[in-house]
Image: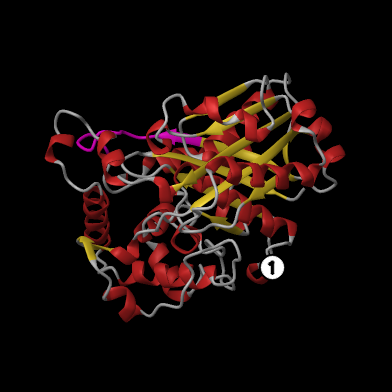
Amino acid sequence: MKVGIVGMGLTPLRPLSPELSYKELVYEAAVKAYNECGINPRKDVDTFVTCAEDYIEGTSIFDEYTPDQLGGALKPNHTVTQDGLQGIIAACLQILTGNFNIAVVEAHVKSSNILTPDGIHLCALDPIYVRPLNLNPYFIAGLEYDRFLRVNMINGIECGEVVIKNKRNALKNPYACYGENLTLDDYLSSDPVSLPLLSADISQPADGACVFVLASEKVATSLNKEPIWISGFGWNSGSYNLDTREWFYLSYVEKAAKMAYQEADIKNPQKEIDFAEIDDTFSYKELQHLEALGIFTEGRVFAKLKEGAFHPEGEFPVNPSGGSLGMGYLYEATGLMRLFVACLQLKGKAGEFQLKKADKALVHSWRGLPTQSTACLIIERR
């Protein structure tokens, strides 16, 4: 049995949205998703999944506040405190039991309402040994970035190339809000945050909401003549403790990717996948993730970057949408945003950032600092 994506909606991302509540953002995305597949959520949907974190929302037991704007009142609802891509996997698993035919997955964020994001990150750190140091959480990314540069014997210019590529790609994406034409000098002159990490290496927060409608193979084509099929998925988590985690190689990403490739019967991801939308919360993470995902291994990532392989017209396009660096960072909704733009490519509806060949894609997410939690999805047109 397969699971199809039959409807989807995303609000254009913005740094500020003072005239809208999170409920209005979710409602707008939900209406778009339901209209695409012609369903009435109150009658047709069997189960709803929300991806949310109470600390980010500022409200305890936040999932009680999501059913109304989704049309899910008095229906089965549950919350996954993870990135939205893990919510997609949770909905797939429900459908694959055979007890559900239609599932809705939602994630959103009003980043502009979060007054103390550093304080939220601190609460995720070990309360005995790390949190009392009261350090800016970006020091974790700075340490990991420094280790990444030293092991690979590079100086950070490569990560600047990632920033320039993704922000330039975003200029063609109408959903993106941080697209710009940068030079390497612009990148190198950005403010230091936690050296070697610069402000330009960090994706900036945005406001937005995303909703997906998934359906079993039995009903998918009756709701959408050309659904996007989920042919494989995988997930994994490493250590949340800073002193027990691997700081260089991301084995948890490798395990999640292998799980997804095996389910999708992919033997050579570089040859069998047309493009990838992968996590770039920080510039160096795009390169680090590419290697762990098994796309280009044994140090070939840097050579391929230099050849321009990851550009939209290159051998293996990576984040043609602009990624989080160009579109904006959506906390728990980041993975859904990435899945949305990948589906646009497969549908041939990506407009100015449409790729020439887009039949099969890898979508990847990382939950962000300080986690080692990740998910992978393989999607295809048929």
Q: Is residue 239 magenta?
A: yes
**Residue depicted at x 79% and y 33%:** 40
Question: How far across and how far down the image is residue 267, in percent?
Answer: 59, 47
The residue stretch that appears in magenta: 235-245
**Residue depicted at x 37% and y 61%:** 283
**Residue depicted at x 74% and y 34%:** 215
Q: Is residue 68 left or right of residue 121?
A: right
Question: How far across and how far down the image is residue 380, in percent?
Answer: 70, 49
Residue position marked by numbered label 1 in the rendering: 351
Residue 227: quarter of image: top right
The amino acid sitting under disc 1 is: Gly
Does residue 189 show up?
A: yes
What kind of secondary structure does the magenta stretch mostly adopt?
loop
**Residue depicted at x 53% and y 70%:** 169
Q: Quadrant of the N terminus?
A: top right
How packed mark 1 is, by other alpha carbons closer than 10 Å (few <14, some 14-19, many 20 or more), is few
Q: Does the magenta stretch include residue 255?
A: no
Give the structural element (helix, strand or loop) at label 1. Answer: helix
Q: Is residue 118 left or right of residue 181?
A: left
Question: How far across and how far down the image is residue 362, in percent?
Answer: 58, 50
